[in-house]
Image (cartoon, rainbow, N blue to C red):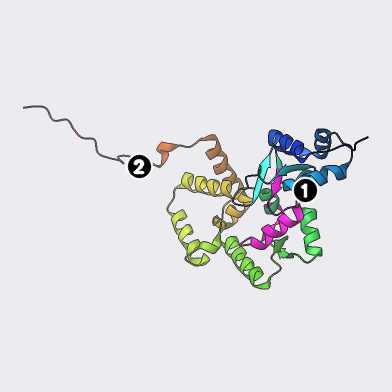
Amino acid sequence: MRPLSFRSDELRSLLLRSQIATLDELKHALGTSVDVTVFRKLKPLDYLTSYSHRGRYYTLHEIAHFDEKGLWSHANVWFSQFGTLLATAESFVNRSPRGYFAEELARDLHVDVQDALHQLAQQRRVTRQIASGLYLYTAIDRTIQQGQLLTRRKVEAVPTVGDASVLEVSAEELKASILLFYSLLDEQQRRLYAGLESLKLGRGGDRSLADFLDLDPHTVARGRQQLLAQDVEVDRARKTGGGRRRVEKKRPK
């Protein structure tokens, strides 16, 4: 009796149709119950394993179209050009201009990263230290780490700045300019400005903007809610008699 012959083309066809597949689906496509057989046939196809869903899904390099961060997803299953969740988290932390808090990295990677970061710190592949009452994860390279900490301090000084590394002025100068601009706004405009910047920051934005602008967090939240609901008094900021003067029509002589 001739031994069964399995072809890699069958796996490639399945993945091209469905984009991703589990090991059970791949075994079914091959007609085998042996895991090793699937991996032997996957190897020449240059396959990828998901870093989300505990690595349960597979795809091909030719299918994945990675974004500028090196990530790609299909049906909420995430893949990385860096490989596993550990390798991806390590790369993100080491390349970040300001390091990462766990919550920030979880937002970028779309998965929980607490265990991965803990393992990386234990294995000394990243470093961590307390900042603002939380663990801040930074690069293992001392020079990069110092740059990340400096940038993080600038961000904390001016929370409205996304990437302080590109600033052409000092954080103190920028902060003074923002506060001057803020002082020129009326009550509603101040509330809406704070709400807008809070929306851009995401979770914790209300508190950050409240501390920065010396506001009650509820005021920031109200501004944010007004913007989302488009509940803004447009005419309130206009002064009586403001705007262009009406042009009187001349009667023909």
Give percent across and percent down for residue 93.
68, 60
Q: List the single residue furthest toward the left.
A: 253
Q: Is residue 51 visible?
A: no
Q: List the single residue furthest toward the front.
A: 1
Q: Nearer the viewer, residue 54 or 4?
A: 4
- Of labels 1 and 2, earlier in sequence is 1
Give percent across and percent down for residue 148.
63, 66
Residue at screen point 61% across, 62% down: 97
Query: Which quarter of the picture shows residue 98?
Result: bottom right
Q: What element does badge 1 sit on?
A: helix
Q: Is residue 249 visible?
A: yes
Return the residue at label 1: 43
Q: CA distance from mark 1 to mark 2?
A: 71 Å
Return the residue at label 2: 239
Q: Nearer the viewer, residue 175 or 19?
A: 19
Q: Nearer the viewer, residue 11 or 223?
A: 11
Q: Tell me if mark 1 has few (under 14), some (14-19) or many (20+) residues whose alpha carbon lies within 10 angstroms of its own.
A: few
Query: Which quarter of the picture shows residue 137?
Result: bottom right
Side of 162 where 8 appears, left or right? right
Amino acid on which the number 1 mark rests in the picture: Lys
Give percent across and percent down for residue 167.
50, 63
- In this rendering, the answer to whether 146 lies above or below 102 is below
Where does the N terminus fall, quadrant-wise? top right
Q: List the single residue furthest toward the bottom.
A: 143
Report the magenta residues as a range.
78-104
Q: What element does badge 2 sit on?
A: loop
Mark 1 or mark 2, whichever is nearer to me = 1
